[in-house]
Image: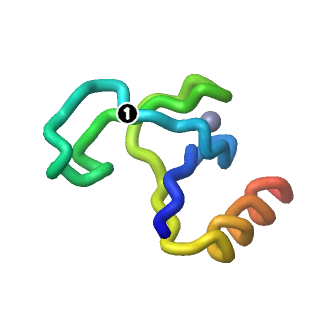
Amino acid sequence: MEIIACPLCGSKNTHSMITTPARLPYFARGYTCDDCQFKGIPLIFSSEKIYKKFLHILKRT
Ligand SMILES: [Zn+2]
């Protein structure tokens, strides 16, 4: 299962800003983060394990 996360704060509270045809991939849509108001392209992780690693790096910087 893919995980969509905010590249700035690592939050998973991201959602699509605009209604676009469902066949469009994530990166073709505008995303916004509920936690830090980031707008743009989200990060997509292929597994929870990789996502957790990202969070770990994010906290150290
Ligand atoms: Zn965020």
Judged left or right of residue 12, residue 44 is: left
**Residue drawn 60% across the image and 26% down it:** 34
Indicate the position of residue 39 as horizontal and vertical percent values.
45, 29
Report the quarter where the C terminus lies.
Answer: bottom right
Indicate the position of residue 44 as horizontal and vertical percent values.
46, 60
Return the residue found at the far right.
60
Q: Is residue 27 above or below residue 39?
A: below
Q: Is residue 23 above or below residue 31?
A: below
| Relative depth, front residue between 61 and 43 | 43
Asked whether mark 1 lies closer than 8 Å to ligand 1, one says no
Q: Is residue 61 above or below residue 18?
A: below
Judged left or right of residue 55, residue 24 is: left
Colour style of the rendered protein structure: rainbow
Q: Amino acid at mark 1?
A: Ser
Judged left or right of residue 33, residue 20 is: left
| Count of all numbered marks drawn on residues in the image | 1
Residue corresponding to mark 1:
16
Indicate the position of residue 17 as horizontal and vertical percent values.
35, 26
**Residue drawn 18% across the image and 34% down it:** 20
Q: Which element type, helix, strand or loop, lies under badge 1?
A: strand
Disc 1: CA contacts within 10 A as few (<14), some (14-19) or many (>=20): some
Quadrant in which ligand 1 is drawn: top right
Judged left or right of residue 44, residue 11 is: right
**Residue drawn 64% across the image and 66% down it:** 51
**Residue drawn 72% across the image and 71% down it:** 53
In which quarter of the view is residue 55 placed?
bottom right
Indicate the position of residue 33 as horizontal and vertical percent values.
55, 31
In which quarter of the view is residue 54 placed?
bottom right
